[in-house]
Image (tube, rainbow, N blue to C red):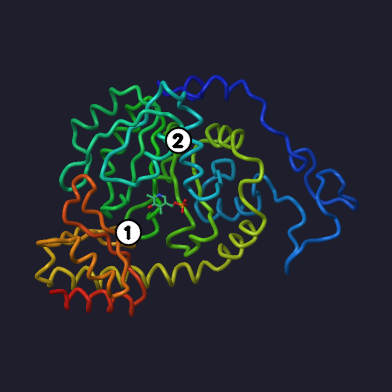
Amino acid sequence: MFDLLSLVRPNIRAMKPYSSARDEFQGEAHVMLDANENSLGSAGPELFNRYPDPLQRAVKAELAKLKGVAENQIFLGNGSDEAIDLLVRLVCIPGQDSILVLPPTYGMYEVAANLNDVRLERLPLTPDFQIASETIAQIVASDAKIVFLCSPNNPTGNLLHAEAIEKILRGFRGLVVVDEAYADFAAFPSWTTRLAEFPNLVVLQTFSKAWGLAGLRLGMAFASPDVVGFLNKIKPPYNVSEATQQHALAALHDAARFEQMREQLLIGRNWLAERLPELAIIEKVFPSDANFLLARFRPDATAVYEFLVARGIIVRNRTTQPGCAGTLRLTVGTPSENEQLLQALQEFK
Ligand SMILES: *Cc1c(COP(=O)(O)O)cnc(C)c1O
């Protein structure tokens, strides 16, 4: 019942992708005069005079080993935000189609829908930020083209129950995008382990969080080779720069540092999760499988937010998000930053 070809926009099925010089000739020759590059070199301290590999093969080879997927199940983008935008454009006809989101959740799904003139349908999570069984039924009955499931969810920090996601994967006719930006902090296997079972599954991950490379802009989408093929067809030819590809390779060879930071952030999260609930101004700290904690403050979260700003500590005010009244989202920092945050909150009057 899931049929990718009938889901993809007809104009995208029919179009011929741009064929770059680097698509037509791969590798290095003695004299490279095919791409209007500058053979003399580069301004600035490093050489970037050649166009990068449009399909980022070296990075994907390393990632495939690390993630246990095939190289043709990996799409790389300029942040996962690029993958979100391309997915919407791949299957949604502007002015006609819709996507589903489950608030409170990440804001970029809505931005991508608005940018592309795609209708957004909101099906709220339960008060404990899970997917109600009526909501599963609504999703399965919907003819929206994509449902975005963020797990662990931003800004709430919790994993969505696997049974609910599985029911949606089995019943929904569109793409099921599981955004795992925070998967590295979660005590649950990634949905990438289930790709072979579900042709409609797309898993998003990123180098922006646990890898500590938000400034690099590199996001990953894992999906069937067919979905990945279509994303490659519609992406800008050189969407991931040579600098990014080189740096990503270096990062992947430095897995020990990744592991060490991840462990330290988990320790920081537990440290804060133990101490924050002791504060009188905190009503509740929500359980987190991410590198942040959502906390409900009383009586006035925004006053706490402003107090922290005045102390030079910036957190995310989530009080206006559906189901998040009175909450602030606190990113886990260095041990010293965590102590400063706790200290400031203890001094709030
Ligand atoms: C941070 C975050 C991302 C990462 O986006 P990038 O464009 O890769 O930096 C994606 N999804 C969610 C839910 C996030 O919180």
Residue at position x 31%, y 32% from top? 168
The residue sitting at the right extreme is 31
> Observer-nearest residue: 319 or 275?
319
Image coordinates of residue 228 in percent, x first then y, are 55, 37
In the rendered image, which residue does mark 1 sit on? 290
> Disc 2, ligand 1: is the CB inside 8 Å?
no
Query: Which kind of residue does numbered mark 2 sit on?
Result: Leu
**C-alpha separation, residue under disc 1 versus residue under disc 2:** 28 Å
Whether residue 303 sits left or right of residue 265 in the image: it is left
Quadrant the N terminus occupies? top left
Residue at position x 18%, y 73% from top? 275
Q: Where is residue 261, by image quadrant? A: bottom left
Label for residue 310? none
Residue at position x 28%, y 55% from top? 157
Image coordinates of residue 178 in percent, x first then y, are 38, 42
> Observer-nearest residue: 91 or 201?
91
Q: Where is residue 295, by image quadrant? A: bottom left
Image coordinates of residue 13 in percent, x first then y, are 58, 22
Label for residue 115? 2
Quadrant the C terminus occupies? bottom left
Mark in front: 1 vs 2: 2
Residue at position x 56%, y 51% from top? 64
Image coordinates of residue 16 in percent, x first then y, are 67, 26
Crowding around mark 2 (Cα neighbors within 10 Å: few <14, some 14 to 19, many 20+) is: few
Query: Which kind of residue does numbered mark 1 sit on?
Result: Ala
Whether residue 4 sits left or right of residue 131 in the image: it is right
Whichever of callouts 1 and 2 sits on the residue coming sooner in the sequence is: 2
What kind of element bears circle 2?
Answer: helix
